[in-house]
Image (cartoon, rainbow, N blue to C red):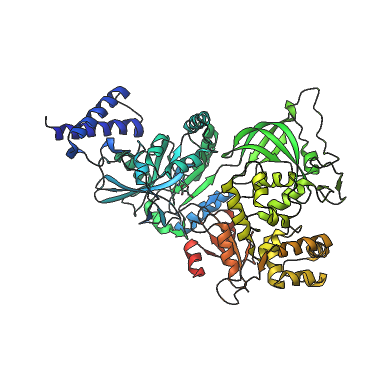
Amino acid sequence: MDHARRAEELRTQLREASHRYYVLDAPTLSDAEYDRLFRELEQLEKDHPDLLTPDSPTQRVGAAPSEKFARVTHRHQMMSLANAMSSEDLDEFVERVHRLLGDEKVRWVMEPKLDGLAVTLTYEEGRFVQGATRGDGLVGEDVTQNLKTIKMIPLQLSHAPAGRFEVRGEVFINKRDFVRMNEEREKAGEPTFVNPRNSAAGALRQLDPRITAQRPLSIYFYEVGEAAPFATHWEKLQKLKNYGLRTNPENELLESVEAVRDKYRRLLEKRHDLPYEIDGTVVKVDSEDQRRRLGAVSRTPRWAIAWKFPAEEEATTVENIFVSVGRTGALTPVAELKPVYVGGVTVGRATLHNEDELRRKDVRVGDRVFLRRAGDVIPEIVRVIVEDRPPEGRPPFEMPKTCPVCGAPVHREPDEAVTRCTNLSCPAQLVGRLRHFAGRLAMDITGLGEETCIRLVQGGLVKTPADLYSVTREQWLSLERMGEKSVDNLLAALHASKKTSLRRFTYALGIRMVGEATALALARRFGSIQAMLDATLDDIQAVRDVGPIVGEQIFTFLQNPENRTAIGRLLAAGVAPEPEAAPAAAGAFAGKTVVLTGTLSRYTRDQAKAEIERRGGRVAGTVSRKTDFVVAGGDAGTKLKKAQELGVRVVDENGFADLLK
Ligand code: IVH
């Protein structure tokens, strides 16, 4: 047989073997046989380079590392799903579908909601030509070379549709592979990943495909790009599988809403037995014609919803309780836990907030507790498993009577929940104040982390933030773990921080109850630090967003002689806060209250907020009737829903970008 024929035969055999192994889960070749055929093909291609085709099974890890990913504009937008957090939310979704479709019968398809990364793959005449991440739904990153290393992605489809064909799926890592990978990383002294999703994302966004190839990535396919040439979603899923594109065997076609609920319960029960992480289910209308008529709102289809599972709870042990002291002297009890994986991350600590909270929950060292984490919320201890306490009991935790850091007496106002250290020069408070001062939203001094602040304070080099500017190069170098390079960077950052805005400066002062929004309002109203220092209590209380209580705090702070000296020293050190640009009096954002929700791809939250505020808008945290509009990024949830209910105007990321122009 001639070489070309043999090469083609080998490719076909290997492809079929992969298909049977990964897609049909019914292997026919042993691993050894597969390897033998694979090596034969490799040898043939080496001897006859003209026989090599780009879709050959040997070509998965061919490409060299790249500098950065090229951007890919999606031919068809990649939408995201609205969330249903409860059974009532599901009812609403179903009702809306029925309202829009009249009395038509609706069939449903339900799929596990994989917690991974959405990708879109383009095939041309059955050959894999390009793969991209979702990005913001409109533009993603070209990760073709990395996707090629995933063995369950066919480089050539069988019975492929002619022309261009775009298919979408989720890249993920199995739980077991994730654990194994972390064990190996730990042994090699490399940092471990917090959850399978992050490690999958990291692997897929590797510039060197050889590294991606070593990560155990999997994929399931669930949608296609173009207006589908299929009558139903179910048919589409069957076809994908025939082409060699893996679909989730848990997917099910369901005839009624009762069946949907039943499937949800079954998946919830099965959740921990599945080899991969899921955070809920996806409920989809089956008929493609009905889907077309239902359409989409901004970037979420009306024909599908992500019905999420409830927050996860896990049991773990409290190994210790310690008390941390913050910049205002507040004593916060913190539980140190035996690390536990819950709701998608590994958790080793949980705040117990304050004395009352600690009493209420009665958490004691050695207790078994339930830890809960809902979405991206801070993990919290739900309750102690009292049944697990030994018969002789355990001593309750007592808040210390003196500051655990400086030993000064602590004090708690009768009507306050917080206990505070009474020593204003307590090193812990000082460290906290320095950290706040240097923070990203304050003076933004990069390189001044917690460790460095502690060493500065311990070394007696700094007593107030102003001292930071007079620490000499030699003194910085004398600190542990400070090399030439980091000192130079830090000195540059300190120098750069002197040119700042009045808003940042005001926030950096660390006045109690003054967050960034209030700092901005003060900066706008007074225009200079001197005007702020000269302001009367009435002046301050009249500022937008400042009530009588906060006003009192601010006034007292600004009148305090020590604080006035500290401010004077900062100005003398060369810190020069620039007045805030007057907010635009006209334009889309002037005087408007805006709520940001979901993930934006082109802006961080801080950037989006800054852009809005520069244009005279205000960013609020919750949606109400007073909200002028909501900017909804990908995966927007309850806030978007609330806005729709209240009839508040919603814009997506593109709409937002247009308004900024
Ligand atoms: S369908 C418009 N099906 O969830 C429908 N998505 O917010 C497009 N996901 O970006 C998505 N499992 O990353 C669909 N079986 C599934 C899914 C799924 C996970 C992810 C996907 C998407 C996000 C939706």
Task: Report the front residue among 127 and 515.
Answer: 515
Q: Does 287 sit above or below residue 603?
A: above
Residue 399: x and y in percent read: 82, 39
- Res. 591 image quadrant: bottom right
- Res. 138 image quadrant: bottom left
- Res. 544 image quadrant: bottom right
Residue 125: x and y in percent read: 24, 47
Residue 421: x and y in percent read: 82, 47
Seen in the image, is 1 located left or right of residue 90? left
Looking at the rendered structure, the number of numbered marks drawn on it comes to 0
Name the residue: 75% across, 54% down.
Answer: 464
Which residue is the extreme one toward the left?
A: 1
Task: Report the front residue among 128 and 169.
Answer: 128
Seen in the image, is 545 located left or right of residue 60? right
Q: Is residue 383 visible?
A: yes
Seen in the image, is 417 located left or right of residue 64? right
Name the residue: 48% across, 68% down.
Answer: 658
Task: Report the front residue among 572 and 441.
Answer: 572
Which residue is the extreme one toward the front?
A: 474
Name the residue: 21% across, 31% down.
Answer: 10
Residue 56: x and y in percent read: 25, 38
Seen in the image, is 432 located left or right of residue 417? left
Quadrant of the frame with the N terminus: top left
Q: Is residue 628 visible?
A: no
